[in-house]
Amino acid sequence: MAAFVEERDWQPFHDPKNLSASIAIEAAELMEHFQWMRTDELPAVKDDPELMNEVRDELADILAYVVSFAGTMGIDLAAALEQKMKKNALKYPAEKFKGKYR
Amino acid sequence: MAAFVEERDWQPFHDPKNLSASIAIEAAELMEHFQWMRTDELPAVKDDPELMNEVRDELADILAYVVSFAGTMGIDLAAALEQKMKKNALKYPAEKFKGKYR
Amino acid sequence: MAAFVEERDWQPFHDPKNLSASIAIEAAELMEHFQWMRTDELPAVKDDPELMNEVRDELADILAYVVSFAGTMGIDLAAALEQKMKKNALKYPAEKFKGKYR
Amino acid sequence: MAAFVEERDWQPFHDPKNLSASIAIEAAELMEHFQWMRTDELPAVKDDPELMNEVRDELADILAYVVSFAGTMGIDLAAALEQKMKKNALKYPAEKFKGKYR
């Protein structure tokens, strides 16, 4: 990602404000594919290869900006995710939710 | 991520519509940290350890949902990113932008 | 809205970039209330007075920033909406959709 | 707005979840116009008639969904805004901010 950005002289645009807005913009584009779908229509998404191609590309756009954000700000993504999931495990204890929705 | 979700019986909630909305919600929370900052204030973000901790957690939340989305929908994230960056390289040729902003 | 902003010396922060991000942030907060709801659970939202109070406040926050954006940028909101709905009527002709979903 | 939706049989799609996502999607499209702009470039936006036309349309799209949301959920927008601004006036007292940024 860093090489891609440098080859285009885009570093000055890659500040945390612009990159967070870019993640939000790409997330909205992903969401747009499901904008008017009912919950019961969603299992069929996987069986629509054309839609899945678009969805895959939108998800990649989000990830590209997440990786750019991490690179620009010196964040270790793997460590950040591991650390946050530990917090989430304490915040949402499994025993509080398991079996709750049956 | 899949284990975390299964331990809480959250699979029924993890459809592509909900997960794309979740990415957008977390992206907005990341963006909120820079909501009122001017461009010239952004380089100082890196020097604020407390802010950086919050930012790291928000970025991890986004990534967690991106990974969940990929897992739920059977998307290979690494392949999707590689494929999309090839498309981006064609759409935004380096020679069209390099040196443009000096 | 303009008086509220001026009384707090917030005019320098109310540029179109910050205000559009603010609309997006408030929209995400509204969306969060329905993040994990199935389509068939949504009719019950209206019968939940506490939830409706929160939803009303979030919608007002969005509208407040829409009005601020319009005021800051000199946009006549009523005229903009009327003009856009005329475009939408041409883009989505009623006869193309009426009866389509039965 | 209600007539526009009814003429197209779109009422079943206009639930609070879909409409809040639609507001977020349109907000992202408005934000996209300023995605890579620096703070010091924003005053020139008003002098760009073509950009202002696009911005006006995006803002109208957001307002259209805000109005649809209010209509669908039985929310009085004017009352909601007035009530929320009273809360905001208490939350952000003018004397706490006035003169703070000089």
Image (cartoon, coloured by chain):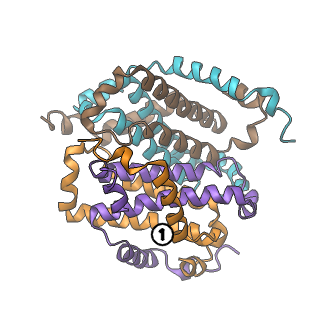
Chain colours: A brown, B cyan, C orange, D purple
Vertical position of residue D91 compared to residue D62: above or below? below
Query: Dot 1, how many residues are within 10 Å of its Cα: few (below 14), some (14-19), or many (20+)?
Result: many
Q: Position of residue B79 (x, y in %)?
A: 53, 16
Q: Nearer the viewer, residue D79 or A99?
A: D79
> For mark 1, what is the residue?
C64
Q: How many marks?
A: 1
- Which amino acid, by three-letter code, is at mark 1? Ala
Q: Position of residue C71 (x, y in %)?
A: 59, 72
Q: Quadrant of the N terminus of chain A?
A: top right
Quarter of the view holding residue C46: bottom left
The reply to whether residue B29 is visible in this rendering is no
- Side of A11 relative to C16 (left or right): right
Q: In the image, what residue occupies the spot 56% across and 57% down?
A: D57
Q: Nearer the viewer, residue C53 or B46?
A: C53
Vertical position of residue B32 compared to residue A77: above or below? below
Q: In the image, what residue occupies the spot 30% across and 68% down?
A: D75
Quarter of the view holding residue B19: top left
Q: Position of residue D24 (x, y in %)?
A: 45, 51
Vertical position of residue D3 compared to residue B89: above or below? below
Q: Nearer the viewer, residue D92 or C81?
A: C81
- Side of D15 relative to C3 (left or right): left
Q: Position of residue C54 (x, y in %)?
A: 31, 63
Q: Quadrant of the C terminus of chain A?
A: top left
Element marked by disc 1: helix
Q: Residue furthest left?
A: A102
Q: In the image, what residue occupies the spot 49% across and 21% down?
A: B77
